[in-house]
Image (cartoon, grey):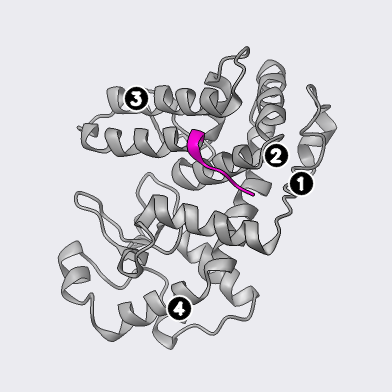
Amino acid sequence: MWRLMCGVFLLFTSLSCISQSYSINLTPQQADKLGRLIWQNEGQQKLQHLTTWNKNEAFPSLGLGHFIWYPSTEKGPFKEQFPELLQFFKHHEVALPQWLAHSEQAPWKSREQFYREFDQAPLTELRLLLSKQLDLQVQFIIKRLETGIPLILADSNKTETKVINYQLARLTTLPEGIFALLDYINFKGEGLLSKESYQGEGWGLKQVLLTMPLEYDDPLRAFSLSADEVLTRRVKNAPKDELRWLEGWRVRVHGYQNIVVN
């Protein structure tokens, strides 16, 4: 059974709990299903989608969670996670191809180069590696939530902390609610970076939890509706047209209501 520890089931949490970590425990079967659901959301569970470079983006998205890897030392506004995943692999003694172990930035400098070399050895090796390490990638996403929730609480005032813990308590009574938290934090982040905001308003997990209605019988539906509102606001605030993404984002977050995790 899924558990989120450190007082998250309490309506109100003392400030001393903020510095503590959260722990999520999954059976191997639940972890496998979680990974496949995230892979479905990010890449339709297709091997070739473990390495992608979306149109109008300046970076490839790699792995189960479409982790960003920038091709230069100049980082964009979105959180880069693929180098952290590689360190996570190394920590768990996963053997990396030599070219990957020594690459500090993504070796493809453009989307055109990436797809021109899509079937060459490096990207083929990378897809094979990522397909064999789905379980570690799930653990990596879980770790982000375990460390992310205390960071969100530390970034919140007293009133926000009460609201966030109340909504976490409602969501974490359901394994599907924990999946929604895991998927969304991987999808749009914690909501703490000033760079990941438009006109001063973020779109991460913190903003979704704070936007959820306080009185709503179905916490999963409340989370989905809140995520829709937050992402719609992002599109309205965006300096460039992001409307093309919104329909897919809505399908994803409203899909949380239909997931069944045994």
Q: Label 1 crowding class (10 Å Cα cut-off): few <14, some 14-19, many 20+?
A: some
The answer to which of 86 and 177 lies nearer the viewer is 177
Q: Name the residue carrying label 2.
A: 150
Residue at the farthest top position: 215
Q: Earlier in the sequence, mark 2 or mark 3?
A: 2
In the image, taking residue 128 as reference, residue 72 lies left or right, namely left
Residue 4 got which mark? none
Q: Which residues are magenta?
A: 257-262
Q: Label 2 crowding class (10 Å Cα cut-off): few <14, some 14-19, many 20+?
A: some
Q: Name the residue carrying label 1.
A: 21
Q: Label 4 crowding class (10 Å Cα cut-off): few <14, some 14-19, many 20+?
A: some
In the image, taking residue 195 as reference, residue 186 lies left or right, namely right
Considering the numbered disc 2 on the image, is that residue within a helix, a strand or a loop?
Answer: helix
Q: Residue at 37%, 44% (x, y): give it.
A: 77
- Image spot of residue 125 (x, y percent): 37, 82
Q: Quadrant of residue 104?
A: bottom left
- Residue 195: in sight, yes or no? no
Q: Residue at 34%, 25% (x, y): give it.
A: 232
Q: Nearer the viewer, mark 2 or mark 3?
A: 3
Q: Quadrant of residue 53?
A: bottom left
Q: Main secondary structure of the magenta part?
A: loop
Mark 1 in CB contact with mark 2 (< 8 angstroms): yes
Residue 232 got which mark? 3
Residue 129 got which mark? 4
The answer to which of 212 and 81 lies nearer the viewer is 212
